[in-house]
Image (tube, rainbow, N blue to C red):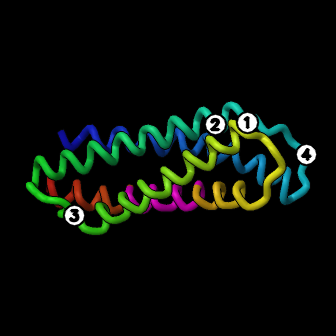
Amino acid sequence: MLWIHPVIQLLGILFAILALRLGWKRYCAVHLGRKCMFPWKEHVQWGQLAEGFWLGGLTLGIWAARWTWRGYGVTGAHFWLGLAMGALILFSFISGTVMDKVKKKRTTLPRLHGFAGFTLMALALAELVTGSLVLARLFF
């Protein structure tokens, strides 16, 4: 059962890389003055897919750890980083949905949304490391 969680999270990371790449185009256009097309709908689709996979994987990971080890937080930093990601995923999803549904000129919300996206990617990479350590302890 524990092998499904990392597979789902890795797919989430791949989708998030695509969303982040598209979001970077928007950042460059708005803040760096570069001319480029921002594929809004694709950014939203990849971002929502990544966040859905991450939340599903988080839920499954918590359940699988509880089932396997009969407790929460057994994986230490991996567990706590995952919970932090969960909160940021919710913020990113809600802020992205608001910007997608109500299009208007904004300054603060897009910056916070972008910061959340970059932070999520950094946390996902940290989770990749801590998760690898958990798997190494479990199987080796």
Q: Earlier in the sequence, mark 2 or mark 3?
A: 2
- Per the rendering, the mark at residue 73 is 3
Quarter of the C terminus within the rendering: bottom left
Marks 4,2: beta carbons within 8 A: no
Badge 2 element: helix
Instruction: Say which of marks 1 and 4 sits in front.
Output: 1
Q: Which residues are magenta?
A: 117-127
Where residue 50 sits in the image (x, y, percent)? 50, 40
- Per the rendering, the mark at residue 40 is 1
Cα–Cα span, label 4 and label 3: 46 Å
Badge 4 element: loop
What's the amino acid at mark 1?
A: Trp
- Residue annotated with mark 2: 44
Q: Earlier in the sequence, mark 4 or mark 3?
A: 4
Instruction: Say which of marks 4 and 2 sits in front.
Output: 2
Q: Residues within 10 Å of mark 4 (few under 14, many from 20)?
A: few
Cα–Cα span, label 1 and label 3: 38 Å
What's the amino acid at mark 2?
A: Val
Q: Is residue 39 left or right of residue 116?
A: right
Instruction: Say which of marks 4 and 3 sits in front.
Output: 3
Residue 17 found in image quarter: top right
